[in-house]
Amino acid sequence: MNRNRRLRQNSAIRSLVRETTVLPSELVYPIFVTEGRGIKEEVPSMPGVYQYSVDRLGEIMDKVVKSGIGGVMIFGVPARKDAKGSEAYRWDGIAQKGIKYIKNNYPEIVIIADICLCAYTSHGHCGLVKDDKILNDETLPYLAEMALTCVQAGADMVAPSDMMDGRVEYIRKVLDNNNFKDTPIMSYSAKYASAYYGPFRDAAHSAPKFGDRKTYQMDFANVKEAIREISSDIVEGADIVMVKPALAYLDVIKEVSQRFDVPVAAYNVSGEYAMVKSASLAGWIDEKKIVLENLYAIKRAGANIIITYHALDAAKWLEESLKIQKD
């Protein structure tokens, strides 16, 4: 008889032989920065997640620093939108102002700037539009300009999430030509056209005004397509590749982590967060146990970095778990 239970009989032994660990430093917390003053407004479909005006960013950033998580990802929520998403690439745009505040006051935190036009365009799509068609090549200069202004504001890394072909190469060239050769690109390489994004679109006010995003985001039935996308992005200069969403795409994360020798990020997205949070508030599940189990599943699949709205709570729970194991 194989007595496999010998290695499960108490917490000390289980800790000794544990195959996977999740550290707070591997987590990234998304933050929504909005125009105005004195604003801390909860996102209705994401309990515990808020939009912050720049003057109140310190409230959340103090918690971020104390938590020990690895970084923050910044999303701007502008007051004005137009067809070209002009507020996205202004040197004094809302994302840029938020980044500058964080860099000046919390220089030790890694700041990742999400690069996309959807929250800034009047039509809600991630690129320029003509005759209801999303234009690929014409969008690239605007994405690159947004990346450049975010880096100039103090972003340590840029993360293009638009899924336009060739955007990594275009952004890389613009950054290099402006003396930002050392700025990494975390590409949303395998970003699926997912129903899990609904709460985020409430938070960023980024729902498309017509059609959907299936002509540029990926078909959720495909894995080989993800490999092609990631191969292209690495060739174009991506330093980190991302799979989004995470929980419904663990097989993709596993495939990517085994095929490529670059860090893999996974985005535990708004819908995944909202389902756990709402079930917890209803008393149906144990939030702490579910969140940690989900994060370990994402890490076990092969992710090196996890972007999650659970990051602050998870960091506390992970530290508590580590302390218990040491005790």
Image (cartoon, rainbow, N blue to C red):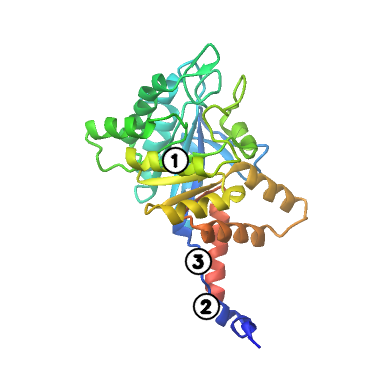
Give the Cα distance between marks 1 and 3: 29 Å
Whether residue 247 is visible: yes
Secondary structure beneath label 3: loop
Q: Which mark is residue 228?
A: 1
**Badges 1 and 3: C-beta atoms under 8 Å apart?**
no
Q: Which residue is mark 3?
A: 21
- Kindly identify the residue that appears in the image at 60 percent across and 32 percent down: 201
- Kindly identify the residue that appears in the image at 35 percent across and 28 percent down: 144
Q: Which residue is mark 2?
A: 17
Sequence-earlier tag: 2 or 1: 2
Q: Nearer the viewer, residue 283 or 40?
A: 283
Please provide percent x and percent y for residue 253. 51, 51
Please provide percent x and percent y for residue 120. 49, 23
Give the Cα distance between marks 3 and 2: 11 Å
At label 2, which amino acid type do we have? Val
- Kindly identify the residue that appears in the image at 61 percent across and 86 percent down: 6
- Kindly identify the residue that appears in the image at 52 percent across and 71 percent down: 322
Q: Nearer the viewer, residue 4 or 60?
A: 4
Q: Which mark is residue 266?
A: none
Secondary structure beneath label 1: helix
Left/right of residue 172 with respect to residue 164 in the rendered view:
left
